[in-house]
Image (spheres, grey):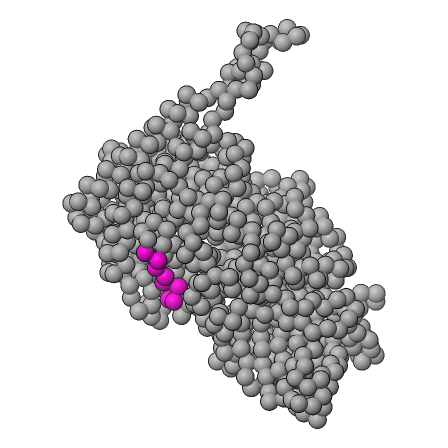
Amino acid sequence: MLPMLLALVAIIPMGLSAQSLYQLDPSVPAQILDANTKLTVLGSRLGSRLSMSLVTQEQGLHTGTMGYDNDQHRALLVQATLAGQVPIALRTGHLAAGSNFAPSQFIRLGLNTYQVEGQSNDLTLKFTVVSPFTPTDSLGEVEQIKTSIAPIHYLIVEATNNTNTAQVAKVQVGLNGIPYDRDKEVALSWWRRGKAMQELFFKDVAGSGSLTALAASGFEATHFELGSYQGLGYSAQLAPKATDTKVYILAGHYSGKVMHHVPTSQDLVFYYNRFWKDIDQVLAYAKQNQSRNLRATAHFERALSASNATPEEKWVVAIAFRTDLANSFLLQGAKDEKPRFYLTEGRFRHMNTLDVAYETEMMALFMPWRLKMQLEQWTDYLATKEVQVPSGRRLGVVKENLEGVSATEFGPFLFHDVGNFPYVFAAEGYDFGPVMPVEENCSFALLLYYYWKLTGDDAFVKRHIGLTEVLMQSLLNRDSNGNGIADYAFGWSSYDVSEAIKRSPDNLYLGVKQLCAYECVAEMLIALPHIATKAKTTPLKSTDEDGTTLDGNGKALFEKAIMDNRYLRAKQAATLHAEAAKISVTLSKTNSKFGYLPVSLDASFKGWDQHSIVICEGLFLPGLAGCQSPILKKLAPMLGNNYAQALAKSTSSYGVRLSDGEEVTWFSKVMVADGISSYWFDKPTSNAKFTYNWNRNNHQAYQDGAFSDTKEWPGNWYPRGVSSIPYLYRSKKLAGPALKRWAEDFRLDRF
């Protein structure tokens, strides 16, 4: 049992005032909060989008029920006053008249928590925003799921008396806005000021029927108005050196359309609507389950403090984890009520079932249902033929685009992006289609393997293994010169900022990924055949009882006696092993010839001979899954040597360049290579310092790349960087089921 280094020392019982302290890992670097601070700390709920994002450059927060791209800027007042002194306020909004900012202020980050603290000589004021979360295995774990998706934030306010005499502190928490009187359907009347109130409701930008609530939980509060601020305040009786703690709740509810799902012609709404029909039900849940939700979140936060990761690595994990959640959509069909999960690419707004940037892959440690759902959804976006479609339909642009190019000739492939928020449709609609057949087919196979090793969900994998083999065959067809690596109709790779890695034929980055996919799929084919459970004792019937002929579309097709396919799976696996061996030989010969692995084997392509750290990327998921492939183990030393050469040639002052002949770096991908180096090459490597230095005071954090010391790559709140999570457990080299058990250590009800 890991030590409880981060805990909620005391939880406030309902209706009582008691001391509490929500402690964050002190090794995570704190950020100074002053007039020069620009950091944005996204605070949103898993799949539920309720925002409470601290935007220091704008001197306030973004709040709302539809997420940071559809919310509103609000100033938040958090201030306290000792008798006879000037009020001190935190930098979460503009100053109210007559107040001063606390002179010494900091921001601290946790995975699902952020904290703003300021102090004067006599008083310390601490404000902690807790977004409840606990790991879950399936959507069927209703109480745990509710904890993680309820549209609520807990706001913990702590006032500490720094003096040696008793003090009375007047504490005020409010928003700049006019509260809404729900009974009269107008603004709250002026005569309610100074009256005892437990809840204030504010109109939400999502729609006329949507509200955001600020509620006092378990203590008596009074409505105040101070300039543009209105909120709930209280008096804290402070003994010498004592702390008074109170909990507020920020809640929201939205029942309308979040996105439109074009393939099924229906709107998608938040999944949480199946649990809570209005904001009153949300508030009731938040109050009744406050203690449990806070304890569960504190327990999960131990994932940081229990790790021996460096402070910079922990900070990167914390900022990236919350950024992923801020881009997540857990929805259900308004008509079919089918759950769906999507992720957006920050301000690019591309909708993904599954991208190739290791977001949902890492989050599967704590939410395997999320990866399972997205794998299932991804198969709905399969290109099998060439179709001409209007790519600009959502914008009214008259432009045609070919989807499924090359699928008819070479075999099916999975699409990349599947829409632009707020629409989900067949595919994103780039000018020439989201054609990444090699990378996406490999990614599906590797993700399925990773999910299988984490969960042992044989039934799910068996349902998809036949399609996966077809996707692999599609890749075999794209090798025209016999070296095993796709060199024809391969589209591009996901490295769209690097010309060589993106476009070059006989691309070794894709080649290694193919090799890894072939080996992993071959293992699944052998391990998961369909074995007949019913002996064939009588000839199959040719007609039914009523005389109906049973042909290939009839019942005989489904007789278990004829479904033993071990011979087929063995044949398919042998083919894939042979192709993997072919690529292995190609890599070995190339390394012998050049002394390293260039980006491409096509010498006619400009930049083909560059060194690149990402050539080994295909090893990432097999390593985390605990793959024991002899071919991969044999290749690892050579790939490790190549990685070391590329790292030495590509490291710059602002990060590790993707290839030594181009300027761009991509932080999350570089951190993937760090994980591979630790797992496969026995060389613990960390380049998190570059990610930390770039993002620690960035208005658009998480930003995932740079072109120079001064030119950033405009990722704007990208859901990337959770590829840094392996920093937390790399020293133990946990993989497969052991890795899943590590993640479950931070789940309260299994501790």
Q: Is residue 341 above or below residue 308?
A: above
Q: Choose between 133 and 597: the one closer to the eye.
A: 133
Q: Would you say residue 4 sits in the magenta stretch?
A: no
Residue farthest along the left direction in this orientation: 593
Answer with the quarter of the image where residue 459 lies.
top right
Q: Would you say residue 684 sits in the magenta stretch?
A: yes
Question: Is residue 23 among the parts visible in the rendering?
Answer: yes
> Which residue range is magenta in the image?
683-690
Answer with the quarter of the image where residue 480 lies.
top left
- The x, y position of residue 45, in whole percent, is 61, 59
Q: Choose between 344 and 116: the one closer to the eye.
A: 116
- The x, y position of residue 12, in whole percent, is 72, 68
Is 307 on the left or on the right of 476, as rendered? right
Question: Which residue is painted at 39% across and 63% down in the image?
Answer: 688
Which quadrant does the N terminus fall into? bottom right
- The x, y position of residue 189, in whole percent, is 81, 75
Q: How many marks?
A: 0
Magenta span dominant secondary structure: loop
Q: Choose between 444 and 312: the one closer to the eye.
A: 312
Question: Which residue is painted at 32% across and 38% down in the image?
Answer: 630
Answer with the quarter of the image where residue 543 lies.
top right
Question: Which residue is painted at 66% across and 74% down in the image?
Answer: 157
- The x, y position of residue 446, in whole percent, is 42, 41
Question: Is residue 419 among the parts visible in the rendering?
Answer: no
